[in-house]
Image (cartoon, rainbow, N blue to C red):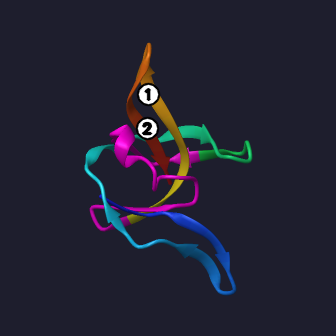
Amino acid sequence: MSVEAYSGSGAYGPVYAAAVTVLGKVSYTRQLVRNADGIEVISEVTAYVHPDDAAPFMPESQVTIDSRVSTVITVGPQSRPGEAVLVKVMCT
């Protein structure tokens, strides 16, 4: 998968950083989640990445998986006591 980190808004719309390739596991499961504004939205794709690779994943970033472009809704660590094992990325 590749990710283009959201950099902000420009005169012509959203601005993204250059695409970065990241390895991870992908699950195509539909789930109801809340976005950063607290609004319920449907997530179609869930990606699991290593914590060291999670920096470009932030809400509004674009993720390309199997030639399909999705937008990141939420990002959260999945951990066990004392350490983050992976990061769960929910996408539209």
Q: Residue at x 42, y 47 (%)?
A: 54
Residue 88 tag number: 2
Q: Residue 46 appears in which quarter of the rendering?
A: top left
Query: At which x and y percent is residue 66?
Result: 27, 62
Q: Residue at x 41, y 73 (%)?
A: 18
Q: Residue 9 appears in which quarter of the rendering?
A: bottom right
Question: For numbered disc 1, what is the local secondary structure?
Answer: strand
**Pointer 2 and pointer 1: residues touching (CB < 8 Å)?**
yes
Residue 10 placement, left or right of 70: right
Segment tinted magenta in the rendering: 42-68
Question: In the rendered image, which residue does mark 1 sit on?
Answer: 78
Query: At which x and y percent is residue 70?
Result: 45, 61
16 is higher (above) or lower (below) than 59: below
Q: Amino acid at mark 1?
A: Gln
Q: Is residue 58 visible?
A: yes
The answer to which of marks 2 and 1 sits earlier in the sequence is 1
Q: Residue at x 37, y 69 (%)?
A: 19
Q: Is residue 28 visible?
A: no
Residue 68 placement, left or right of 71: left
Question: For numbered disc 2, what is the local secondary structure?
Answer: strand
Q: Is residue 34 or residue 52 the one in the foreground?
A: 52
Query: At which x and y percent is residue 65?
Result: 32, 59
Q: Residue 81 appears in which quarter of the rendering?
A: top left
Q: Amino acid at mark 2?
A: Lys
Residue 69 tag number: none
Q: Residue at x 42, y 37 (%)?
A: 87
Residue extending farthest to the top is 81
82 is higher (above) or lower (below) than 24: above
